[in-house]
Amino acid sequence: MRIAQMYSHLNGHEHILVHKPQAWADIEEAIAAVDAEECRTKVSEEKRMLGRMLVSPQDLNKQFAAEFERCGRKESRTSYWVTADAKLIRRTLTLTPEEQKREIEEAGEAAIFSYNQTDFVKERIAVEVQLGKYSFVAYDLFVKHMAFFVGDLIDVGVEILPVKELQQEMSSGVPYYEGELYNLIREGRGIPAVPLVLVGIAP
């Protein structure tokens, strides 16, 4: 695979190149090691592509996982407590999980445990490979990466997506770089308020 397109939001790419150049080299190397043709294992059952051999998102994910784990990137979770009271959430947002739970319960509200998980984290850079449904990309960009950034666990989030050329060789519903770039830019230059690198991959 190769990086066909890239967009740096709030200087995310520049931050990595200046502060963690080896980390970007590792990301490029992991992408280059993934073979899309090896993952052309899915027989389409969709009417418009019936019987056609497609690139399997599951097989691609397995290859990406193996490559990113090989260079020391691991799953990471950030935990927190939520409640139905908006003012209480604002007040507890920046507290530790233990302090959040205590303050919510002391206010007489129910404290509900929650967490965000990201796939590949190392050196304060989170990498997500998104080959699921298109709605998951917004969650990654506006919730996952943001939560890890606000929690001071990462400095940059990297979102890897197929470009349209590759997405057309996959099942319907898979997100693609060009569409998600449009969605990101439509929000404005400062939203989300976390440095990101949107990466479009192609065979």
Image (tube, rainbow, N blue to C red):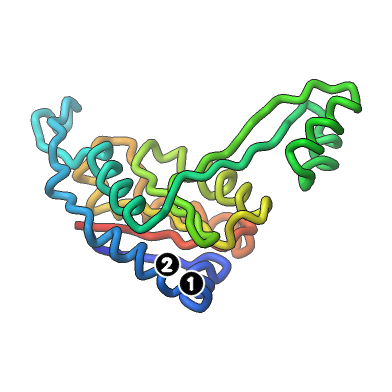
Is 112 on the left or on the right of 58, as rendered? right
The picture places residue 6, in percent across and down from the top left corner, at: 39, 66
- Return the residue nearer the eye: 30 or 57: 30
Q: Quadrant of the C terminus?
A: bottom left
The picture places residue 167, in percent across and down from the top left corner, at: 26, 47
Q: Is 69 rendered above or below residue 155?
A: above
Is 71 on the left or on the right of 106, as rendered? left
Could you tell me the amino acid type at mark 1? Lys
Q: Secondary structure at mark 2?
A: helix
Mark 2 = which residue?
Answer: 23
Q: Quadrant of the N terminus?
A: bottom left
Q: Is 19 rendered above or below residue 43?
A: below
- Return the residue nearer the eye: 165 or 19: 19
- Return the residue nearer the eye: 71 or 127: 71
Residue placed at 29% from the left, 53% from the top? 67
Q: Quadrant of residue 48?
A: top left
Characterize the local packing of mark 2: few (<14), some (14-19) or many (20 or more) Cα atoms within 10 angstroms. some
How many angstroms separate mark 1 from mark 2 (CA)? Answer: 5 Å
Mark 1 = which residue?
Answer: 20
Q: Are marks 1 and 2 in contact (CB under 8 Å)?
A: yes
Residue 111: give its label.
Answer: none
Could you tell me the amino acid type at mark 2? Ala
Q: Quadrant of residue 79?
A: top right
The picture places residue 82, in percent across and down from the top left corner, at: 73, 31
Characterize the local packing of mark 1: few (<14), some (14-19) or many (20 or more) Cα atoms within 10 angstroms. some
Q: Quadrant of residue 2?
A: bottom left
Q: Secondary structure at mark 1?
A: loop
The picture places residue 148, in percent across and down from the top left corner, at: 60, 50
